[in-house]
Amino acid sequence: MAAGFQFDELSDYDVNIFAFDRDKYLTDDRWMSQLGDVLLYQKEQFPFCGVVVPTRLILFRDRTRMDLSFWHPTTLSEIVSGNKEYEIYRNGYHILVDKDRLAERLQPADGSGFLISPPARAAFLQTVYDFWFAAYCVARYLSRGDLWYAKLLESRYIKDHLFRMALWNHQAAHVWKPNPVLHTEGKRFEKWASSELVDAVSRCFSPYDVEDTWRSLSAMVELFTRLARQTAIQLDIEYPDRTEQDIISYLQYLKDR
């Protein structure tokens, strides 16, 4: 397994099941009781290279957590052949059952999963523009007094763009070296972020209050602007100063109206 990961009583088991008859696990969930005394479970799914992978996220009464995903064996064949890549396997895996002796042909783990690579110019600028549009939306609903919806946007969508820029900024400062601790969804953030960044991020969250939410929005704008400008220099991308100035002016107008 890759270095840098923490294993404790709250760690879960991620089990990938490759089966031709996987539907039998999805149409009737009573089979889960054979694994243990189920407290509760959740039905989810996620996309992978154009296909949908169904899952069952199970919490047992003994507090064990197990996340099962159900794949078609052809996907495993494509991963083995190199036509598709499941990057989490690069950080480590353990084969439990391999009836067709296919999984044994997987590439060995090297700890390079979840690579954060330099974004192309278009991807970088799209994140910049997406952040500013999300900031406008938060300000718009705050200005209207629609606090619930403003908090919904402020609590997730805009922070997705902010976190992506924070990752890019961190990796640019470290010459884009692979780091298994990094995670695109924010896991283990405090393990790699500087104390300065953690302190700045702490001001980007706020209680259910209009004025406090304006302050958190202002903190996000300030932090994103600093990170994006630094990263643009590292990537040799011209930063859209005019757009930034105009949207900040509009945000101030929405706050003052």
Image (cartoon, rainbow, N blue to C red):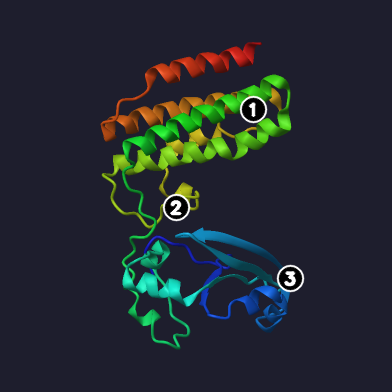
For mark 2, give the secondary structure: loop
Q: Which mark is residue 183?
A: 2
Q: Would residue 207 be visible to someone looking at this image? A: no
Q: Would residue 150 be visible to someone looking at this image? A: yes
For mark 1, give the secondary structure: helix
Q: Nearer the viewer, residue 140 or 39?
A: 140
| Residue hosting label 3 | 39
Q: In the rendered view, does 214 fall on the left or right side of 197?
A: right
Mark 3: amino acid? Leu
Name the quadrant of the C terminus: top right
Q: Residue at x 65, y 81 (%)?
A: 35
- Tell me, yes or no, whether the two marked residues, 1 and 3, touch with CB atoms within 8 Å: no
Q: In the rendered view, does 166 fall on the left or right side of 118?
A: right
For mark 3, give the secondary structure: strand
Q: Residue at x 38, y 82 (%)?
A: 102
| Residue hosting label 1 | 213
- The CA distance from mark 1 to mark 2 is 27 Å
Earlier sequence position, callout 1 versus callout 2: 2
In percent of width and height, residue 166 lies at 42, 39
Mark 2: amino acid? His
Q: Which mark is residue 122?
A: none
The total of numbered circles placed on residues is 3
- The CA distance from mark 1 to mark 3 is 37 Å
